[in-house]
Image (cartoon, coloured by chain):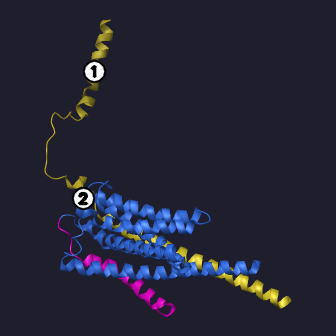
């Protein structure tokens, strides 16, 4: 029994450095006027994201108009060709 | 329009390519700093969006009362552009707000009415696409409602207390900011004119194609 108690106490001493490494719990909140620079949200990525989105969105939309116009014009040409073939065969 | 389309497209592309240089040359705003530069694309996109909704509304009114098919095609083209420029405004706004206000979104009068206006435009396009026969007149009425909503969105910042800057910001812009801002507005207006012309042409071509198919069936 005494041996077991001595081993337990020895383990507690071994754990002492681990407890020493832990940060001490805060006892109070300290107010400050400004957020430290490391905590501030950088503006550059937001600005770049905004401009990139505008350019990409407009480019995709322009491409979609171009593609749709091309499709309609190709369909009209195919119709014209079919009509020409029909009149030629008569 | 075809003759001036290419030169106008070249000038517009050059203006957009040069716009970041102009914007970087503008002075920083005292409280917001760099993130305020989003303003130079954000505000013009909403201005163009309002213009597109107005054009859609007026063309829809003409279509409702006169059943003019050309007006209907103009309304569809303008509605689609309103959705695109509205989306740009709705995405660039939160990117600016995250830094300036500390939040992505705020359910205040300006932001909420702007979102509602964009949803009305989306409603117009969805009714048009999936509404079936007769949806053209129904969507035209939605287009008129959208137009009626624009003045409310515009003055919302002056009537209700919001976090969004008031309409007084643009008329009181300082000299260094005024030039880049109106440069961007002009670039957006020119791009809108070009896209609008191309989009109306697409509607005309589609109508012609339908007529050709009908003629072939007969």
Q: Nearer the viewer, residue A15 or B87?
A: B87
Q: Please state the horizontal and vertical placement of residue B85, each as a whole percent of the image.
A: 41, 70
Q: Relative to residue B150, is residue B168 drawn left or right?
A: left
Whether the magenta-drawn stretch holds residue B44 is answered as: no
Query: Given contact means CB atoms under 8 Å apart, are the residues at marks 1 and 2 in contact?
Result: no
Q: Residue furthest front?
A: B65
Q: Please state the horizontal and vertical placement of residue B13, each as a whole percent of the image.
A: 42, 83
**Residue occupying image coordinates x 59% and y 79%:** A69
Please give the chain letter of the residue carrying mark 1: A
**Residue occupying image coordinates x 18% and y 77%:** B174
- Could you classify mark 2 by the number of other residues whose Cα lies within 10 Å: few (under 14), some (14-19), or many (20 or more)? few
Q: Which residues are magenta?
A: B1-30
In three-dimensional space, the C-alpha distance between marks 1 and 2, rounded to whole angstroms, equals: 65 Å
Q: What color was chain B assigned in the picture?
A: blue
Q: Are marks 1 and 2 on the same chain?
A: no
Q: Residue furthest top?
A: A1
Observer able to see residue A56: no
Q: Quadrant of the C terminus of chain B?
A: bottom right
Q: What color was chain A assigned in the picture?
A: yellow
Q: Nearer the viewer, residue A68 or B180?
A: A68
Please give the chain letter of the residue carrying mark 2: B
Whether the magenta-drawn stretch holds residue B3 is answered as: yes
Tag of residue A12: 1
- Could you classify mark 1 by the number of other residues whose Cα lies within 10 Å: few (under 14), some (14-19), or many (20 or more)? few
Q: Please state the horizontal and vertical placement of residue B208, each as a whole percent of the image.
A: 64, 82
Q: Which residue is mark 2?
A: B160
Q: Relative to residue A20, is residue B78 drawn left or right?
A: right
């Amino acid at each position: 029994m005494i041996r077991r108690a001595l081993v337990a106490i020895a383990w507690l001493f071994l754990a002492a450095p681990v407890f020493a490494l832990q940060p001490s719990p805060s006892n109070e909140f300290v107010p400050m006027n400004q957020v430290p620079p490391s905590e501030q949200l950088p503006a550059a990525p937001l600005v770049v994201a905004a401009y990139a989105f505008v350019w990409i969105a407009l480019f995709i939309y322009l491409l979609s108009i171009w593609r749709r116009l091309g499709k309609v014009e190709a369909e009209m040409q195919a119709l014209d060709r079919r009509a020409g073939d029909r009149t030629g065969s008569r | 329009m075809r003759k001036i389309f290419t030169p106008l497209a070249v000038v517009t592309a050059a203006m957009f390519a040069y716009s970041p240089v102009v914007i970087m040359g503008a002075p920083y705003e005292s409280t917001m700093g760099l993130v305020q530069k989003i303003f130079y694309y954000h505000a013009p996109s909403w201005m163009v969006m309002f213009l597109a909704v107005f054009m859609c509304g007026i063309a829809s009114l003409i279509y409702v009362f006169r059943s003019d098919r050309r007006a209907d095609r103009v309304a569809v083209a303008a509605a689609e552009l309103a959705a695109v420029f509205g989306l740009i405004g709705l995405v660039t706004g939160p990117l600016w707000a995250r830094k300036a206000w500390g939040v992505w979104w705020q359910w205040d009068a300006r932001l909420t009415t702007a979102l509602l206006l964009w949803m009305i435009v989306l409603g117009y396009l969805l009714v048009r696409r999936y509404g079936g026969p007769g949806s053209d007149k129904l969507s035209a009425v939605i287009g008129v409602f959208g137009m009626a909503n624009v003045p409310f969105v515009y003055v919302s910042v002056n009537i209700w207390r919001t976090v969004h800057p008031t309409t007084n910001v643009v008329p009181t812009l300082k000299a260094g900011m005024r030039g880049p801002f109106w440069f961007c507005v002009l670039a957006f207006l020119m791009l809108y004119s070009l896209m609008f012309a191309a989009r109306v042409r697409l509607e005309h071509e589609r109508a012609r194609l339908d007529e050709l198919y009908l003629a072939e069936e007969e």
